[in-house]
Image: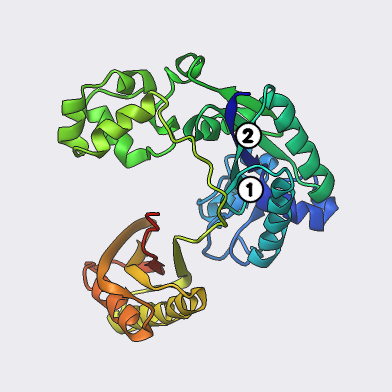
Amino acid sequence: MPAWVLHVDLDQFIAAVEILRDPSLAGKPVVVGGRGDPTERAVVATASYEARESGVHSGIPLRLALRRCPDAVFLPSDPTAYDEASAGVMAVLRSFGVPLEVLGWDEAFLGVTADDPFEFARSVQAAVLDRTRLSCSVGIGDNKLRAKLATGFAKPAGVFQLTRSNWFEVMADRPTTALWGIGTKTARKLAELGYTTVAELARADEDALATRLGPRMGPWYRGLARGAGGTAVTSTPYVAKSRSRETTFQSDLTELPEITAEVVALARRVAADVVDEGRPAARVAVKVRFVPFFTHTRSVTLPAPTADPGLLENAALAVLAKFTLDRPIRLLGVRAEFPEDRR
């Protein structure tokens, strides 16, 4: 029987969990983020489909979400509840007895051998809905990249197949940002070379790509445009790549002593998370969001992986020193990244 990769993605996951907790929210524009107060500085964690119709999406400020959708119901984020809901869904997926690769709270790959992958996908949807009351969309592909992108065409609560046979029919005229792994910054660099669509990038000159984007990444982007991707689905528990903490300030920070004190406090919280994780960190990053909403991140690789709180704190301060702190600050964050598992 043919081998397939299925990408299972829960629909409006965080909002859906909140609606399960309060069924009266069904059909209403729901926005989750921060402490649930749209007058405070915080960003949207997720929005229900009804809120998205008004232009509300993850990552925008809650205040902007309020302006775009004044009738929205704003709720505080509750990671513990989302952890529990996610664990329930992953338990359902594991019950199918096929390789399961968890990507995060709300998505996972399944490695499936089946004559009819649509039938298998629909059985997954039915089981998840029956046992968790959460709906999901399923992308079917002949590799991970195509399965992941197929899910976007399946939402909400549908099934879509994207393979080598229909890749260019579906993707050719789409912008390069439609590809998993290409963000806006990379897309701008590609556009400077004359590649704005998937089809154009698929026909790109590899030497030009290598010169502009590096000898490894340049050709890799061309491969993405052709639908290239891995096929192995590895049954391993989800392992966090990093631990981070951040704070949005209701009043801007302008003085170096207070900025330094906040970075130290965040670094200590991250260090405690690293200790709890039981793995040393290999890299430390600091995120600074300047007024009005310019975000910059700097990082440093540690001489050796460590879980020592003092060393992590010192590393965070060293990274902070890389910034030019000449504007008021509205957010600070510290992230500890774990070494890559190269097995």
**Quick one: label 2, few (<14), some, or many (20+) residues within 10 Å?**
many
Q: Which residue is located at x 46 percent, y 67 percent?
A: 243
Percent across and percent down for residue 334 are 39, 70
Relative placement, left or right, of 86 versus 108 is: right
Q: Quadrant of residue 267?
A: bottom left
**Quick one: label 1, few (<14), some, or many (20+) residues within 10 Å?**
many
- Above or below, 183 against 60 in this view is above
Q: Of discs 2 and 1, which sits in the foreground? A: 2
Percent across and percent down for residue 20 are 80, 53
- What residue does disc 1 label? 47
- Above or below, 134 against 225 in this view is below
Decide if residue 14 is in sight here. yes
Relative placement, left or right, of 92 versus 242 is: right
Q: Which residue is located at x 84 percent, y 52 percent?
A: 23
Query: The disc labelled 1 sits on which kind of residue?
Result: Ala
Could you tell me which secondary element the residue under label 1 belongs to? Answer: strand
Relative placement, left or right, of 33 versus 291 is: right
Q: Which residue is located at x 50 percent, y 51 percent?
A: 59
